């Protein structure tokens, strides 16, 4: 997956995290946080892969 997909996943995760915080749903907030971290990992992996070429 590319850098853009990782960034998109971060944004989606941040929205879920905020929604969970506003609605008082800790599970939703946690799922959003995890998705945000996955997106950061994807983005970093794409950067590393690109620099290795």
Image: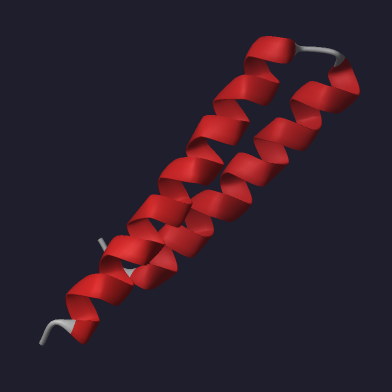
Q: Which quadrant, please, contains the C terminus?
A: bottom left
Q: Residue at x 42, y 59 (%)?
A: 6
Residue 46, x across and y down, in percent: 28, 69
Residue 15, quarter of picture? top right
Residue 14 image-quadrant placement: top right
Q: How many marks?
A: 0
**In x, y percent, where is residue 26?**
72, 12
Protein image colouring: secondary structure
Is residue 45 toward the left or the right of residue 32 in the image?
left
Q: Position of residue 17 (x, y in %)?
A: 70, 33
| Residue at 64% in and 12% down | 27
Position of residue 24 measured from the top left corner of the image (x, y, whole percent): 85, 13
43 in relation to 24, above or below = below
Furthest residue in direction right, as rendered: 22
What residue is drawn where x is 61% and y is 53%? 11
Looking at the image, residue 22 lies above or below residue 12 = above
Which one is nearer the viewer's eye here, 12 or 29?
A: 29
Q: Residue at x 67, y 34 (%)?
A: 16
Q: Is residue 52 left or right of residue 24?
A: left
Q: Residue furthest left?
A: 53
In what quadrant of the picture does the N terminus appear? bottom left
């Amino acid at each position: 997956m590319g850098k853009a997909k990782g960034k998109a996943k971060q944004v989606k995760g941040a929205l879920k995290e905020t929604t969970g915080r506003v609605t008082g749903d800790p599970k939703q907030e946690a799922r959003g946080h995890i998705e945000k971290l996955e997106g950061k990992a994807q983005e970093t992996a794409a950067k590393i892969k690109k620099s290795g070429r």
